[in-house]
Amino acid sequence: MNPLWLSHSTATSSIGRGLDQTLTALRVRRAGLVPCAFDTVDLATYIGEVAEVDAVQLPAHLADYDCRNNRLALLGLMQDGFAEAVRAAIGKYGAQRIGLFLGTSTSGILQTELAYRRRDPVSGALPADFIYGTTHNTFSVADFTRHYFGLTGPAVVVSSACSSSAKVFGSARRMMAAGLIDAAVVGGVDSLCLTTLYGFNSLGLVSEQACRPFDTQRNGISIGEAAAFALLEHTPEHLDADAVLLLGIGESSDAYHMSSPHPEGLGARMAMLDALKMAGLQASEIDYINLHGTATQSNDAVEGKAVSSVFGSGTPCSSTKGATGHTLGAAGGVEAVICALILQHGLLPAGLNTRQLDATLDLDYILVNREQQVARVLSNSFGFGGTNCSLVFGRAGKP
Amino acid sequence: MTLTAYIEGIGLLGPGLTDWPSSRAALSGQQAYQSHKTVLPPPALLPAAERRRSGAIVKLTLATGLEAIAAAGLDAADLPSVFSSSGGDGENCHAICEMLASDDRLISPTRFHNSVHNTASGYWCIATGAMTTASVLCAYDASFAAGLLEALTQVVVDNTRSVLLACDTAYPEPLHSARPIPDAFGIALVLAPQRSARSLAQITVDLSDASADRLDDAALEGLRKAIPAARGLPLLCSIAHRQNGQVVLDYLDSSSLAVAIALC
């Protein structure tokens, strides 16, 4: 593929608002996971909650979109001058020439969960103030964002569970290459809700401790929430050495089981190999891998197998979910932005909460931060339904 | 900038529409269209455990997708796919919200994994053995056109065949009142980058600001407006008429899709 330039990016999660706070948290190894006190949830688990999401006010003319997920989206867009960058891109390319591709798994479903507590006792009807289309519906976050900016180009939500906001890069790449658009706003927004907390709990996949990716004692995920965005443009002739490029994307399906990964990690392996192939790179040319690393027994075991089958045991890797929690449909986007920070700041972030590395997995899983300039990194995102996506990013100038 | 592809197979299932061949007469106006409740066939291709767990959206996706691929004489396992739905499994969503509002919030694992928007895609891959890329999309009322655009970019940019599966199912009350989709409806299209012996029609698609076409038949027009996946009906009606033509499909409030159709 022709590399695409991540001209601007931003991430907001439980470890911080925007890039500076996110980078600082990774540097000082500060996790955002706390015991769950969300809404009325009575589960013994840790969550990665973004502070003061509900204090965010949507503009009056977009009041119909008001729900936790769109508040979090707006909070994310306000960081790092991202909204200004989108407006500048509109000035440069035109509102109809910018595509919008956002990932989410649960969108504003919390709004419906809350509305079901207020049903009419006689008729069972939902309260009159409940608006399905602009809150609950999976498209709501993209529809909010396009109206917020006045974007009039193609817009869509990708919702393939926990690969959603990695796969948006694939959809954006195709539409840019097809010439329908000149630039793309991509990203992911997923917010806390009862469906995912009680749902993952029903599968026995929620840990009662802060999640411990790749630890011998790992026993499940910590659910988080996040908003991450990037502006993709065609690569200009001249770029700063530390500019970040999207070099390759690999997408595959397990065709195995709805909620368990392929036991040999075949789909994951295909996604990584396809991403390398599209980037025109050998496995040995990747300097760091941001693992999906959810901290469930089976996910980490399968990903470990798949990674070592492609890369051997020598490539430094870690999961940043010990810091952010698993932000589900936003995870691919958050981790893409973390990859950009890694490339620009030469920091390989240690996996947090991992005390005893699973020795059965043959990986260079890093438990101490490394300050080291890197040129190319790969990020994995896998999800329910057996959906896999790997992204390769690189610095414009090699170190 | 236009995108060109060849339709090699069509799948169709909805109220009064049992499959593509038997629906052509009604869609071309040769026979009166009569609506009756959509009948979803059991998903025979799924293993028994998955068959029991599958909801309406899975049955609808499998039925329409397999019809289109069989008509094209292809193997589903080889095809990249695009799933576009305005809502996912409505019955399942209602059941979860009802439990989460009750004193017993312990929803079942099956309920939960059926709650993801990519449920149909997951079951599709299990049923067909497809390990190819699957794009799973939602664009509310614009979902059909959004899915068509994604499939076309796969075909044009990656020079591959692709199957579009645009399917919607109804919510039960009380969500039905908030989102009144009347019944299950799906369209599947196999799209190819080059003309072949199986090609039914060449389509050339561009973004437009023209108003979407309405259908002459009032009942079909009602269907088009009521179910997002049915916004693709003007394309199928045009092919059913066996005439070259141009249709405009509904997309976002800011744009539509202009589709030029040349029969092969």
Image: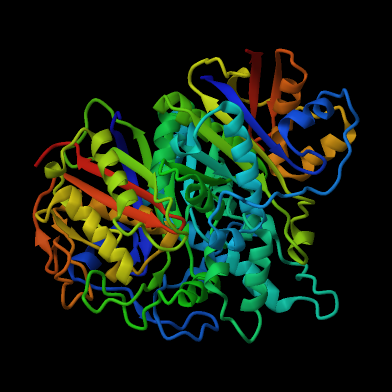
> Quick one: A44 or A239, which is closer to the camera?
A44
Which residue: 43% across, 27% down?
A: B160
Q: How is the image coloured?
A: rainbow
Residue B227 % position (x, y): 74, 44
Q: Considering only vertical position in the picture, is B124 above or below A42?
A: above
What is the quadrant of the N terminus of chain A in the image? top left
Residue B43 position in % (x across, y down)? 62, 51
Horizontally, residue B45 falls left or right of residue A243, namely: right
Q: Which residue is nearer to you in this view: A183 or A138?
A: A138
**In the figure, residue A219 lies in which quadrant?**
bottom left
B203 relative to A301 in the view: left or right: right
Q: Can residue B25 be seen in this view?
A: yes
- Does residue A210 lie above or below B70 as drawn? below
Taking A303 as reference, is B40 left or right? Answer: right
* Residue B64 falls in image quadrant: top right
Q: Residue at x 75, y 63 (%)?
A: B172
Tally of numbered discs = 0
Q: Position of residue B205 (x, y in %)?
A: 59, 22
Q: Which residue is drawn at 77% across and 67% down?
A: B174
Q: Is residue A179 visible?
A: no
In which quadrant of the rendered image does the C terminus of chain A lie? top left
Q: Reply above or below: B152 against A383.
A: above
Rendered residue at 55%/68% (across/down): B110
Residue A364 placed where, x, y %? Answer: 12, 61
Question: In this image, A83 relative to A338: left or right?
Answer: right
